[in-house]
Amino acid sequence: MARSNWKQLDRLATIGLPVLIALDVVAGIFFRFRTTSKLWLDEAQGVNIAQHSFSQIVGYLKNDGAPPLYYFLLHGWMKVVGTSDFDVRGFSGLVSVLTLVVVFFAARAWFEKTTAWLALAVVAVLPYTVYFATETRMYSLVMLESCILLLVLRHHLNQPRWSTTVTLAVVGATMLYTHYWAIYFVGVFGLFGLIRWFVHRREAGRRDWMLVLAPALAFVAFLPWVPIFNSQRLHTGTPWAPGPGIYQIFTWFNGFTVNQSVHMVVASLHNEVTMLVFVGLVLYGVFGLAMKRSERTLLLDYTGASDARTLTFIVMVTMAFGLVASHVSGSAYVPRYAAVVAIPISMLAARGIRNFETPLRIIVVLGLLSGAALWTDKWGVNVQRSQGGVIGEALKAAPAGSLVYVCPDQLGPSLLRYAPKDLTYIGYPRFEDPSIVNWYDYLDAYNAQTPVQNAAREANSITASTPVYVVWAPNYGLKRTCFDFTEALARSTQRHLVTLVPLGLSGYYQSMELQQLVR
């Protein structure tokens, strides 16, 4: 192609790049408030807890395993806005939109204006950030808090002040009260300050010891919650899954480019291309040198740029600490925990795009990532997270006073949100109201009696005229338990099972089956 044609394309790309970024932002905001799914377990559990008073919220969280800040905020939000599915998800959507504003200023502080605009575009369309904007959970808030921390950290490194130290401490404390993986993220800030102090110890740089002080103050502010945290650590944990394998240290980044409401990521060209593009851009953001206009090769510096090294240190050490700690303690890891590093890794990807230097190259690379990401975002709108709405609709035909066993009780929060209120619901394994799952020593409750023993006991309390239904699902850390309980209950009551709604394993993130025990 003639040189004049390339120049003309570059001029057009100079106009087209802001247009593409604007389209990314508009599309990203649109998809942040678009989902057709019912609330699944974690969302419904959170809403059910947050509807209570602050003191009651703390009581429920002792048996749940989470810190309280998000639930307090959601409580206030629901008081003002409402409790419909759209209402409760709107809080996460609004927080995620605020994060788009902050991420621009954070990336501008760490790099320069073009990278800041690119970071805005990346965070706007990234499937990870879009999905959690549509989920009634704390992960959008975690991303906002981490973004604020990065912004303040950059200003502190430029000019350390008591104001930035205090701000780092306050935001760090709020993050600790939002999600426990913040322990690793905030802790890495302190470690970063210690390393800087050691390197610059002869100069006794004030910014370094103040940077150590800020996380320390955050952890001091967290001390009142430590007794509850320690009880949760010992008695709640994650009984639904084992700890992560060491191999996950090398695979966790895949979660940023897929929709999180699928149990298993099916291999596809689209998923592979999106992941490879994103990871490639992150690596190029860490080690890449800006291409000159006449160059056609990617140049790498194995030491990386200074600011990129800092963000890489924060990302990698946080994830390494978290995964190793989870592996040692046997606590599960799921991709949503990586929300603590979603913003810095997105900023590195934006720097990778910026390193292509010319508007034409940048618009091509950003267009490839944006197109792949928005395809996933659009697809995710119709992914169904819970079958609870379908089961709830079917239960409307059940006579008032019918007995509905929910096995495991982990199906309860979602199911009861959409099911008739004039039925009696009993959750397995505690045989209590399953609207809020009690995770305290959950496996002990599960192991207390066998499914057959439990079924025989329950059968003794069921009269011949009582309509009985069972909503159940396999797995959930309980293997065949619910299947065995359902079969044993049918035998003990001398009834046979009729499937009213089959298990939707391929269509729902949280699937469940409805059966009736018929004489």
Image: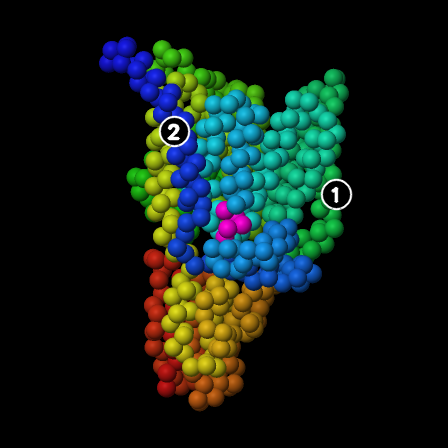
Q: Amino acid at mark 2?
A: Val
In the image, farthest residue toward the left: 1
Viewer can see residue 257: no
| Residue beneath disc 2 | 19
Q: Indicate whether 300 appears above or below 87.
A: above
Pick the front one: 122 or 336: 122
Image quadrant in which you'd find residue 175: top right
Q: Amino acid at mark 1?
A: Val
Q: Which mark is residue 365?
A: none
Q: Is residue 461 left or right of residue 200?
A: left
Q: Residues within 10 Å of mark 1 (few under 14, many from 20)?
A: few
- Quadrant where the C terminus sits is bottom left
Number of marks in the image? 2
Q: Secondary structure at mark 2?
A: helix
- Quadrant where the N terminus sits is top left
Q: Secondary structure at mark 1?
A: helix
Image position, residue 153 (x, y; %):
64, 30
| Residue beneath disc 1 | 220
Image position, residue 286 (x, y; %):
49, 25
Instruction: Please give the range of residues in magenta.
Output: 89-93
Image position, residue 184 (x, y; %):
62, 40
In primary-sequence order, the first of circles 1 and 2 is 2
